[in-house]
Image (tube, rainbow, N blue to C red):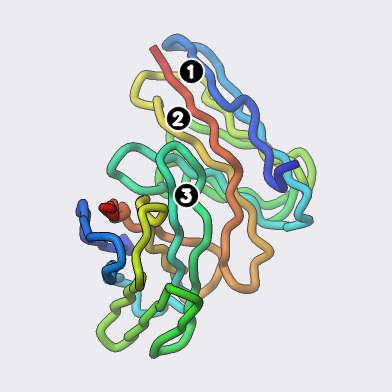
């Protein structure tokens, strides 16, 4: 089983719908991150969390919210999805000392 | 805005050749530098990391760091078709290891 698991892996939805992407990890890391990837644009940081009481905005947080339900769980929500949120979303974890990120398999979201 | 710049490519090399991937960064406080490989539709996976000026070798891969020039590179010797992927340069931000900033990636194609 993957150390960092994302669900769903693929989702097609309509404009205005609320969407939640979930991430769980078994690596025991405190730090968790949500990134978005668009073709040709690399990875952009949406939100990150260092523990269950610590949530921080990244570069592109507008239109997104997150919840850190436990050390191992970090969810990303789109309250009212719009087509330009169509992208590949990655959850990642880090143990912090080196900065190395460990990625989940990605969630491909299509907003029609 | 901290930036990480990579040649967008695509970079095409023949099998057995040396592939050279380059990256520059704007934050002089960056401490850790990473190269990730990403196959199409897959999650990024760590190839190498480097913290100190100079070269670091791991098998066919060599990372080179020059903090004075704010430049980091990745050399792939004896390139194989299986090396064909997008290579992402990532740099820690703001003098700490809590957040990575990614370049847009360089697409490498190794031709048999």
- Judge whether A62 appears above or below B24 on screen: above
Position in image of residue A112 (x %, y %): 38, 11
Q: Point out the tag, 2 or 3, that comes first from the N-terminus.
A: 3
Position in image of residue A59 (x %, y %): 41, 48
- Chain under numbered label 3: A
Query: Circle 1 sits in a helix, a strand or a loop, which is it?
Result: loop
Measure how far apart labels 2 and 3 are at the Cα level.
12 Å
Do the CB atoms of the residues marked 3 and 1 lie less than 8 Å apart? Answer: no
Determine crowd level at label 2: few under 14, some 14-19, many 20+ residues with C-alpha closer than 10 A.
Answer: few
Do the CB atoms of the residues marked 2 and 3 lie less than 8 Å apart? Answer: no
* Image-based side of B110 in relation to B60, left or right: left
Query: Circle 2 sits in a helix, a strand or a loop, which is it?
Result: loop
Please say whether residue B90 is visible from this viewpoint.
yes
Name the residue tied to disc 1: A80
Q: Residue at x 29, y 61 (%)?
A: B15
Q: The N terminus of chain B appears in which quarter of the rendering?
A: bottom left
Q: Residue furthest front?
A: B112
Do the CB atoms of the residues marked 1 and 2 lie less than 8 Å apart? Answer: yes
Position in image of residue B106 (x %, y %): 28, 55
* Image-based side of A106 in relation to B71, left or right: right
Please say whether residue A49 is visible from this viewpoint.
no
Q: Point out the tag, 1 or 2, that comes first from the N-terminus.
A: 2
Name the residue tied to disc 3: A58
Q: Residue at x 60, y 43 (%)?
A: A104
* Image-based side of A66 in relation to B36, left or right: right
Q: Nearer the viewer, residue A46 or A98?
A: A98
- Judge whether B70 appears above or below A77 on screen: below
Determine crowd level at label 1: few under 14, some 14-19, many 20+ residues with C-alpha closer than 10 A.
Answer: few
Name the residue tied to disc 2: A63
């Amino acid at each position: 089983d993957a150390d960092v698991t994302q669900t769903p892996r693929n989702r097609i939805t309509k404009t205005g719908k609320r969407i939640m992407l979930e991430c769980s990890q078994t690596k025991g890391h405190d730090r968790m991150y949500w990134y978005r990837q668009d073709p040709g644009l690399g990875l952009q940081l949406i939100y990150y969390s260092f523990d269950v009481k610590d949530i921080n905005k990244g570069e592109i947080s507008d239109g997104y919210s997150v919840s850190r339900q436990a050390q191992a769980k970090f969810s990303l929500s789109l309250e009212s999805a719009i087509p330009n949120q169509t992208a590949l979303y990655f959850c990642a974890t880090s143990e912090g000392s080196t900065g190395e990120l460990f990625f989940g398999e990605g969630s491909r979201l299509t907003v029609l | 805005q901290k930036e990480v710049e990579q040649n967008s490519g695509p970079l095409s090399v023949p099998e057995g050749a040396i592939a050279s991937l380059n990256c520059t960064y704007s934050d002089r406080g960056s401490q850790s530098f990473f190269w990730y490989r990403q196959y199409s539709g897959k999650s990024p996976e760590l190839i190498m990391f480097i913290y100190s000026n100079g070269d670091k070798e791991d098998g066919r891969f060599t990372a080179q760091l020059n903090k004075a020039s704010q430049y980091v590179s990745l050399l792939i010797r004896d390139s194989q078709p299986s090396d064909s992927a997008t290579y992402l340069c990532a740099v820690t931000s703001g003098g700490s290891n809590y957040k990575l900033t990614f370049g847009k990636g360089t697409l490498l194609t190794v031709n048999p």
